[in-house]
Image (tube, helix red, strand yellow):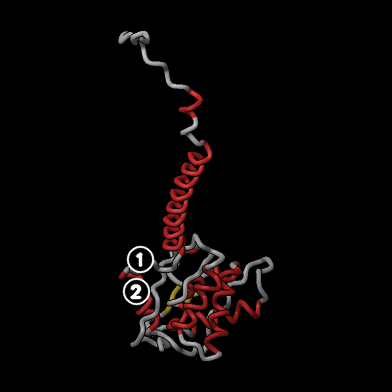
Amino acid sequence: MGKKKDKNTPAPAANPSKAAKGFNPWIAGAIVVAVVGVGALVLSSRTDEAATSSSTPQAADADPRAVARAAAAAKLGPRKHASLPPVPFQGYAPPRSPEVITAAYRFAADHPEILSYVPCFCGCERSGHGANHDCFVKQRAENGDVVAWDEHGVECAVCIDVANRSRQMFESGASVRDIRAAIDKEFGANAPGAHMGTPKPPATGAHGAH
């Protein structure tokens, strides 16, 4: 007869090498990479959405005061001035030719119904400007004639370029809505941090809105 097995004898310990065979570091690594990748993708998507929202012109509703201000200025145009104050050139070379600058001032004076709905992208909202119109026109008489210029328009290439691009489109027959869309696209892409808050032109019922 064989020897009886002692019940008190401990069972043999598991072979560590056999247990280790159940753990595959490559699979574990792949799982970790997959989890991290999904998390990064979600975070990137949310970040892109936030950036797009913040850089889109007028993502939020326009300030009612800005809307009323633009509408009041738009009612004064278009108009032809018999005379205008001298353009306030300074004692140094401007960023654009005097002819180009003068054309920008003249367009702002004669067409507030356009430039009151076109933003500027140089950061001059910090000076109280609400639209590209304000970069050039400081004060109008009750009848709408310009009586004082803003000197800022003389020395800022961005203001001048926005006004003249708007003028060129207007002279080619573009509506104020088309002009606004083109200016936002052309200049806004280079100034994602600009937030002038200029209201967009109404669909109907305003000068040049069609």
57 shown above or below 1? below
Dot label at residue 67: 2
Q: Residues within 10 Å of mark 2 (few under 14, many from 20)?
A: some
Three-letter amino acid code of the residue under disc 2: Val
Q: Secondary structure at mark 2?
A: helix
Q: Secondary structure at mark 1?
A: loop
Image position of 127 (left or right of 1)? right
31 shown above or below 127? above
Q: Residue at x 35, y 79 (%)?
A: 71
Q: Residue at x 44, y 55 (%)?
A: 47
x and y percent of residue 205 in the render?
33, 87
x and y percent of residue 164 in the render?
58, 79
Residue 210 appears in which quarter of the rendering? bottom left
Query: Which is nearer the N-term, disc 2 or disc 1?
Result: 1
Q: Residue at x 54, y 67 (%)?
A: 189
Judge by depth and name the residue closer to the eye, 1 or 120: 1
Q: Quadrant of the N terminus?
A: top left
Which residue, given by chain and number where applicable, does mark 1 sit on? 60
x and y percent of residue 40 in the render?
47, 49
Can the viewer see residue 149 in this picture?
no
Kindly check if marks 2 and 1 are in contact, taking CB atoms under 8 A apart as contact: no
Mark pair 2, 1: CA separation: 13 Å
Residue 139 appears in which quarter of the rendering? bottom left
189 shown above or below 86? above
Q: Mark 2 or mark 1: which is in front?
A: 1
Q: Residue at x 58, y 73 (%)?
A: 160
Can the viewer see residue 20 in this picture?
yes
x and y percent of residue 175 in the render?
46, 87
